[in-house]
Amino acid sequence: MLDVVLYRPSHKARPRFYRVEIAMDLFSEVSVLREWGVKGGAPCETITSFGNLRDASHAADAYRIRAQKRGYKRA
């Protein structure tokens, strides 16, 4: 449904990324998928399920804002 990818340039050769996605799962719940890591490496991810789109979008916005405060920017 909705996908936001943020990047943070690093002092090292490999920049970092942070991705937040809102999607429907198989059980008709709305899930927020967060994925982060070093570009070109194996990412870490977590999925949180919510009962409705409003709660999921509030959580996704909070994750995005928190990442931007840590220096991540939109590509």
Image (cartoon, helix red, strand yellow):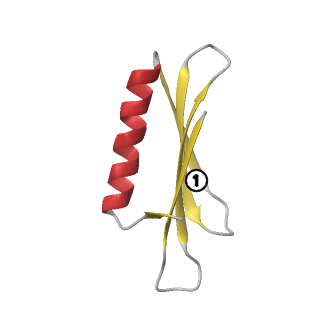
- 1 in relation to 35, above or below: above
Which residue is under mark 1?
44
Q: Give coordinates of residue 11: x percent, y percent.
A: 46, 86
> Considering the image in quadrants, where does the N terminus appear?
top right
> Considering the image in quadrants, where does the C terminus appear?
bottom right
Within 10 Å of disc 1 (Cα), the crowding (few <14, some 14-19, many 20+) is few
Q: Residue at x 52, y 85 (%)?
A: 12
Q: How many marks?
A: 1
Task: Report the front residue among 3 and 29.
Answer: 3
- 39 in relation to 12, above or below: above
Q: Give coordinates of residue 23: x percent, y percent.
A: 60, 30
Q: Residue at x 42, y 31 (%)?
A: 57
**Is 62 placed left or right of 74 in the picture?**
left
**Is 64 placed left or right of 23 in the picture?**
left
Q: Give coordinates of residue 29: x percent, y percent.
A: 55, 17
**Is 68 placed left or right of 28 in the picture?**
left
Q: Residue at x 56, y 62 (%)?
A: 37
Q: Give coordinates of residue 64: x percent, y percent.
A: 40, 49
Secondary structure of the residue carrying tag 1 is strand
